[in-house]
Amino acid sequence: MPRYLLNTNIVSFLLKRNPSVIQQFHQVLPEDIVLSAVVEAELRYGAARLPPGARLHAILPEFLNRSQILPWDSVCAKQYGELRARLEAEGTPMGFFDTMIAAHGLAYGLTVVTNDQAFHRIDQLTIEDWTKTPHRA
């Protein structure tokens, strides 16, 4: 079973060849790393906003083809509804896509790899930041 759900910002660091993220990425078995379909959507949107010759257009399709992408399903939707309602009731709402990614991680017991501090609002969510914290497999 996969253990790590990469957030969009970590994939960006990876594609930009951030040494810390690359090092920690290579310490994990490929089958233990997944992307949410929500992250795929954000990455594709980012690429679509760039000019045709941008480097991302060349490297993103290959990266996505090699990635295990989990569909955002009804289990995630149930978790999302509960999570979003709780965060709003606590007065600490998150962006819709971040909430969807967090819900995906919660729904399947995955560690969300991100350097976005907003995810720390969710006590039940396991988080790692591969830009700073050394990963220990």
Image (cartoon, helix red, strand yellow):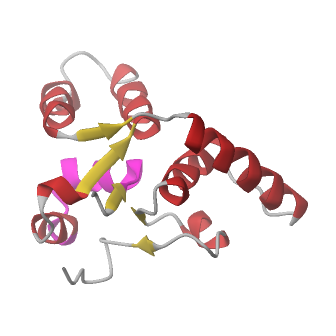
Query: Dividing the picture into quarters, in which one does residue 86 lie?
Result: bottom right
Provide residue 14's location: percent of width, then percent of height.
Answer: 22, 54
Query: Compared with residue 32, is residue 131 higher up or lower down, i.e. above or below?
Result: below
Q: Is residue 2 left or right of residue 66?
A: right
User: Can you say which quadrant of the picture contains the C terminus?
Assistant: bottom left
Examine the structure image and report whether residue 11 is included in the region drawn in magenta. yes
Residue 13, position in %: x, y?
27, 55
Q: Nearer the viewer, residue 56 or 24?
A: 24
Give the magenta range: 6-20
Give the camera-side residue of 76 and 118.
Answer: 76
Q: Quadrant of residue 78?
A: top right
Q: Position of residue 57 (x, y in %)?
A: 20, 24
At 32% from the left edge and 79% from the top edge, which residue is drawn?
Answer: 132
Please report the residue visible at 75 percent of the width from the left and 52 percent of the height from the top.
82
x 47%, y 36%: residue: 38
42 horizontally vs 137: left or right: right
Residue 23 screen position, x and y as percent: 12, 70
Quarter of the image with the N terminus is bottom left
**Dominant secondary-structure state across the stretch colored magenta:** helix
- Can residue 95 be seen in this snapshot? no
